Amino acid sequence: MLDDAELVPRIQGGDLSAFESLYCKYKNELYRTALAITRDQGAAEELLQDCFLRAYDHIDGVDACSSLRPWLHRIIVNLSYNWSAKKRLHLVSFEDAFERLLTLPRSSPERVYERQELMKAVDEAIRSLSMPQRVVVVLFYLQGFSLVEIAYVLDCPVGTVKSRLHNARRALKRRLTVDLSMSREAAYELLSS
Amino acid sequence: MSDNSRDELDVLLERALRKWAADEAPPERVWTNIRLGLHDRSRRSSARSGRVRLWWTEVWALAADIVVSGRMILTPSLQGGENGWTRRLVVAGPSSSSLRLSIHH
């Protein structure tokens, strides 16, 4: 996989194959971010498309030495915010996606049931978060961004990110403690199996 | 909360989200649409620059017409068209040069 520092000058020179390489490199994680925020496959596809069209339009202003990952996430998160504002955050459940996860053949019926309960609880808990908290949770837990990187993506102070993540964790903990009859250790064991 | 202080809840959330997203990938049509979008943009962009070129061509043609017309109207004819003129404008030099006021008695 080519490095961003190699791809950027080529894209700036109008090389479409370099742009396709960039798309292939980041499409999955950007799509997953958009999907985790919007919970709508059609919207996630549209946002990914708009994200790369915008990236192409503004690639000339990009510093060729730095990674494009935070910058691309910044674009798709902004687009997700715009989308949710238009849609008034019409949420589609994670359940369809979870369904595939839950029907893993290696699982016993009891395990499927337990896992189903756990995933439903996590789904409900994440769904209950506000949009800013959910975005921070997705960037932190799903994409593994640091707090500083999230602050760049959201264009806000690190303190704001910390506060959102702290409040999100507290809300998730409260919610999961109520919803789950099993301990977090058991849940962790279940998910890691 | 710092990046390092992780507990079971963090691990649970991370694993749940990553497992959920693991198999998700955008369909091929997204890249097809992006390519179409880029093609459409470049076509519109070249059409726009074509329109700008055409506009400048029109401007220069109009300017040339004005200069030529000015010469025809204001320059005296070979048959002694200065009669009755006390004052007139003469357009002289290339089209880009400014109008020069010339007074003849």
Image: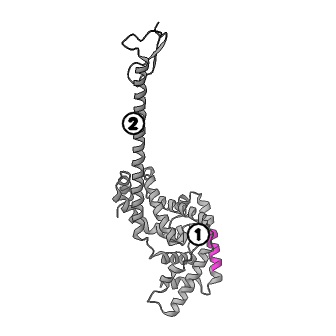
Residue count near mark 1 (Cα–Cα under 10 Å), binned few <14, some 14–19, many ≥20: many
Chain ID at mark 2:
B
Residue count near mark 2 (Cα–Cα under 10 Å), binned few <14, some 14–19, many ≥20: few
Where is mark 1, residue-wise?
A: A134
Q: Position of residue A105 (x, y in %)?
A: 44, 89
Pick the residue in front: A108 or B33. Answer: B33
Q: Is residue A185 left or right of residue A28?
A: right
- Secondary structure under tag 1 reads helix
Where on the picture, by quarter, is residue B50? Answer: top left
Direction bottom: furthest residue: A109
Q: Position of residue A130 (x, y in %)?
A: 63, 69
The reply to whether residue B69 is visible in this rendering is: yes
| Residue A123 is one of the magenta-drawn residues | no
Direction front: furthest residue: B79
Q: Position of residue A2 (x, y in %)?
A: 35, 61
Give, as a three-letter code, the residue at label 1.
Arg
The reply to whether residue A143 is visible in this rendering is: no
- Secondary structure under tag 2 reads helix
Chain ID at mark 1:
A
User: Can you say whether A110 is above or below A8 in the image?
Assistant: below
Query: Residue at coordinates 62% horizontally, 75% vertically from top-left?
Result: A172
Where is mark 2, residue-wise?
A: B57
Residue range (magenta): A166-175
User: Can you say whether B52 is above or below B65 in the image?
Assistant: below
Mark number, residue B77: none
Give, as a three-letter code, the residue at label 2.
Thr
Q: CA distance from mark 2 to mark 1?
A: 55 Å
